[in-house]
Image (tube, grey):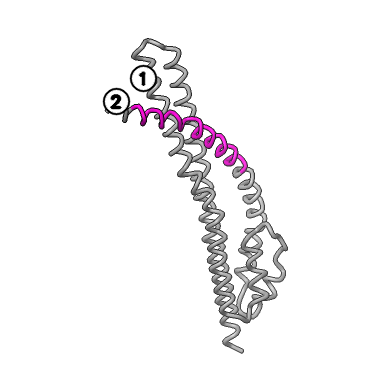
Amino acid sequence: MNSITNVLYWISTGLMVPVVAILIFLFFKALIMVGNFYTQFVSKRRNNNLINLKFEQMDSENASQIIGSLPDNNQVLVLNYLRRMLNLKDNEAHLHRLLANFEIDADKDLAKSKTLSKLGPILGLMGTLIPMGPALVGLSTGDIGSMASNMQVAFATTVIGLVIGAIGFLTQQIKQRWYLQDYTNLEFVVKLFIEKKHKQ
């Protein structure tokens, strides 16, 4: 039994370095995500009012003209798809395919946030529990310095993991609302194009 517990202890302590390394990597990835999210937020805010105003005026007759007048911004996913739909407005199958592709592209972007929101706390918890073993050993032997050092690592990994998880969760929640609104707009455009085609 002692040999089994020793193997488990060696495995868990051996995981400490990879866990800390991945946490540091994810933390910097989360910081980059915050920067990208801010850029996306500014661009979205700049274009959203214009898009909403244009869509209120849109019907099956003027849809092509209004979409053609929207700003040319490749960084905004919905504008990119609106232009592609305009080029394929007479092909109903391609329009539905573009709608499906938009969902896939939106999910790819959301997957980054989902990964951070789940992996951050998991790795933070692992980074908390792994040093607790050596800390308890240090406490039992009276080595207060070793215990304090291990507890410091445990608390630090918890905080970093929670920060990563919070960034992932917040960006995911906001982006989900954005993409839901964008999908609704794209679906509306598809219906207008199909309606116009059936009128002809």
Is most of the magenta stretch helix, strand or loop?
helix
Spatial CA span between label 2 and label 1? 17 Å
Above or below 142: residue 41: below
Residue 118 at least partly seen: yes
Q: Secondary structure at mark 2?
A: helix
Tell me, for residue 136, which label it has, or none.
1
**Front in this rendered view, residue 33 or 189:** 33
Which x, y percent locates residue 141? 36, 12
Secondary element at image label 1 = helix
Most extreme residue toward the bottom is: 200
Q: Nearer the viewer, mark 2 or mark 1?
A: 2
The residue positioned farthest toward the top in the image shown: 142
Q: Residue 93: where, in percent of width, then height?
A: 56, 78
Q: Which mark is residue 109?
A: none
| Identity of the residue drawn at 70% across and 75% down | 65
The one nearer the camera, 100 or 137, is 137
Sequence-wise, which precedes: disc 2 or disc 1? 2
Residue 45 included in the magenta stretch of the image: no
Relative to residue 186, is residue 48 depicted above or below?
Answer: above
Tell me if 82 is positioned left or right of 100 in this view. Answer: right
Q: Quadrant of the N terminus?
A: top left
Q: Percent from the top left, x then y, of residue 25?
A: 57, 37
- Whether residue 158 is visible to the viewer of this picture, yes or no, is no
> What residue lies at 49% left-to-right and 50% top-to-bottom?
173
Q: Residue at x 66, y 61 (%)?
A: 50
Q: Amino acid at mark 2?
A: Asn
Q: Is residue 8 magenta?
A: yes
**Label 1 neighbour load within 10 Å: few <14, some 14-19, many 20+:** some
Residue denoted by label 2: 2
- Specify start and end residues of the magenta stretch as a single range: 6-32
Front residue of 141 and 28: 141
Give the amino acid type for the residue marked by disc 1 in the picture.
Leu
